[in-house]
Amino acid sequence: MHSAPGRQRILVLLSLILLMSCASPASGNENSLTLFLCGDVMTGRGVDQILPHPSDPRIHEPFMKDARGYVNIAEQANGPIPLPVDLSYIWGTALEVWDEMQPDLRIINLETSITACDEFWPGKGINYRMHPGNVSCLNQGKIDFCSLANNHTLDWGYNGLLETMKTLEGANIRFAGAGTNREEAGTPAVFEIEGKARVIVWALCMSSSGVPSQWEAGDHTPGVNLIRDFSSETIRILAKQFSQIKRAGDILVVSIHWGGNWGYQIPETYSRFAHRLIDEAGVDLIHGHSSHHPRLIELQMTSLKIKNFRLQRATRSDARWLQETLNHSSPGFGARLALGQDNRLFLK
């Protein structure tokens, strides 16, 4: 946890679908605010195929041309999946964790277009999509917010993006980080948590996470909210945007899709930029994602794993491996994680 006089500040550098984090800025207070933060959520390919309304299974990957191939691989490893599964199936034990934690907001990075469009982005290699008829799987998880500022939002082109936004709106799920133009892509979602606080969620992405530069939203063209660098000018621009929305007592969350998929280390430039957003731009919490490796966080973490496209609690040995891996890969941050009796990880 990173604190400064006058207000509590929380920094999260990474949270994956397997690493579900809850942040409570005022722990112990009955009016405290609890946020569920989850990184890359992918409901396409094999996941979409086992749901009640699967998309056309044709995909455009170098080594797999039919999304049902991923279902076959999962079943070969772990046994048959009862097709079609119900819309709550994929969340598995996560539903119990949410019941225990009772988060005020559930925030995810959605790395899947929700569209029936067949106009995939050529040459990308991996194009994720879920059929709009399956969007209620997100409602089953009571997801409040989806960041669309990532490297899969336009996998099925501009029409796919527009259908994704329309489908989320129809499902009553808020989003940010993409839009029909630059202004819309840079507009945050605002939540009024009764009796607690107003929460503003901004979504950004960087090319380092694999976002094509041509996906950046323009004055009159759809796209994502892409930032180009970690410069002082970028900080100044973001600080100005934030100040136009944030009021006294608000909690400002910035969700950033940045960095490559692989590796345990957090580049110093990323950490420095995150702290500058907190110290100079008025941000209260950074929710980072992109990496497929676990990395250090500054909040409580619940360890889950996926089996047959369904979340379940990690075993004690899996949770201990995660603890040891994070502690081994993060000595430069001066933080150590302890393992609780319930397999949750928390700062010592």
Image (spheres, rainbow, N blue to C red):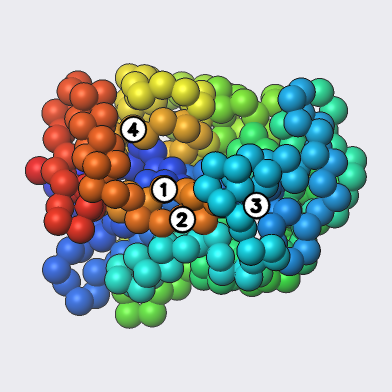
Residue 36 appears in the figure: yes
For the residue pair 148 and 323, the one nearer the viewer reads as 323
Dot 3, how many residues are within 10 Å of its Cα: few (below 14), some (14-19), or many (20+)?
many
Q: Is mark 1 on a helix, strand or loop?
A: strand
Res 47 label: 3
> Which residue: 74% across, 37% down?
127
Left or right of 152: which side holds 27? Answer: left
What whole-number distance in Å separates the C-alpha atoms at marks 2 and 1? 6 Å
> Which residue: 10% across, 43% down?
348
Q: Which of marks 4 and 2 is nearer the N terminus?
A: 4
Residue 232: x percent and y percent? Answer: 43, 24
For the residue pair 222 and 114, the one nearer the viewer reads as 114
Q: Which of marks 3 and 4 is nearer the N terminus?
A: 3
Q: Which residue lies furthest to the left in this view?
A: 348
What whole-number distance in Å separates the C-alpha atoms at marks 3 and 2? 12 Å
What whole-number distance in Å separates the C-alpha atoms at marks 1 and 4? 16 Å
Residue under label 1, please give it: 305
Q: Earlier in the sequence, mark 3 or mark 1?
A: 3
Mark 2 in CB contact with mark 1 (< 8 angstroms)? yes
Q: Is residue 268 above or below residue 341?
A: above
Residue under label 4, please give it: 295
Q: Is mark 3 on a helix, strand or loop?
A: helix
Q: Which of marks 1 and 4 is nearer the N terminus?
A: 4
What whole-number distance in Å separates the C-alpha atoms at marks 3 and 1? 15 Å
Residue under label 2, please give it: 311
Q: Which of marks 3 and 2 is nearer the N terminus?
A: 3
> Which three-letter amino acid code belongs to the residue tagged 4?
Arg
Q: In this view, does 103 lie above or below 20?
A: below
